[in-house]
Amino acid sequence: MNDADINFYFDPLCPFAWMTSKWVRQVTAQRDYTVDWRFISLRMLNADVDYDSHFPAGYEAGHTAGLRLLRVAARTRAEHGRQAVGPLYEAIGTQAFDSAAAPALGPEEGGSREFVEPLLERVGLPAGLADALDDASWDGELRAETDEALALTGKDVGTPIIHFGPPRGTAFFGPVISRLPSDQEAIRLWDHVVGLASFPGFAELKRSLRERPQLRSFGVSPGETGIQEDWHGGSRRLTK
């Protein structure tokens, strides 16, 4: 039975989900909160989308790689418990977005055995869990959890989705952040977000202009400010 204070739905190769997850970890380190790390697949969410016309090159391969990693995460949860998912996600995100190798990581490479096996071993899990990369039998569970997340927010969203105080609390897509706050700022931001989320009738506060996130995979180092771009549907717009 899950009695977490926060349900956090993530796709492991979504950079903005990763940024938000780092912020949530800052908050849980200072507050007595527990997180259940749950799954939402961007590949499944965009199953009916024509990638060539809606996304820049590489997005379909990247979303597919994220789905492959979610299969590994689902098998990890089934065989090693829910508590094993958070450390695995943290290892994947660190390698994919914050490591020295991140800028050179191709969109398909994140879903490879060569990528995930060392990360499984790093967090004390069997490398054989990587066999799930190609095992579509996990897709039913992933689709059900993706649908579970969308049932909380509606379908016109992306990742992450945070469910505050489940099962009766409110859930929202985001917040989308490009800069990692200080520990003190993290708590202040959290309190503001929870305040908005708990207000009856509040639904959306949005802008499509975003800075590139402070991630090495985007060429933006901690302390630097990424260039501002117009994003649509989780990707930089193809035309202005």
Image (spheres, rainbow, N blue to C red):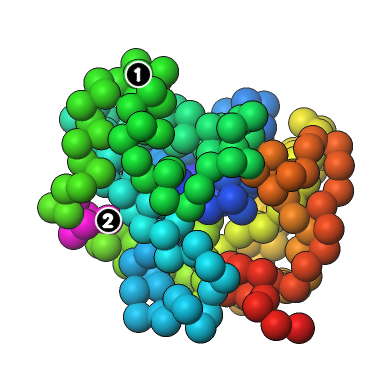
Q: Which residues are magenta?
A: 138-142
Asked where in the image residue 55 lies, by quadrant, the reply is bottom right
Task: Residue at 13%, 53% (x, y): give it.
Answer: 137
Q: Quadrant of the C terminus?
A: bottom right
Report whether 26 appears left or right of 108: right
Report whether 36 appears left or right of 73: right
User: Mark 1: which amino acid?
Assistant: Glu
Q: Nearer the viewer, residue 5 or 77?
A: 77
User: Mark 2: which amino acid?
Assistant: Leu
Q: Residues within 10 Å of mark 1 (few under 14, many from 20)?
A: some
Q: Residue 123: image x %, image y %?
A: 40, 19
Q: Which label was assigned to residue 142?
A: 2
Q: Quickly name the residue at label 1.
A: 121
Q: Residues within 10 Å of mark 2 (few under 14, many from 20)?
A: many
Considering the numbered disc 1 on the image, is that residue within a helix, a strand or a loop? helix
Q: Is residue 217 above or below residue 149?
A: above
First-in-chain label (2 vs 1): 1
Q: Is residue 159 above or below residue 108?
A: below
Q: CA distance from mark 2 to mark 1?
A: 23 Å
Task: Residue at 69%, 42% (x, y): give it.
Answer: 215
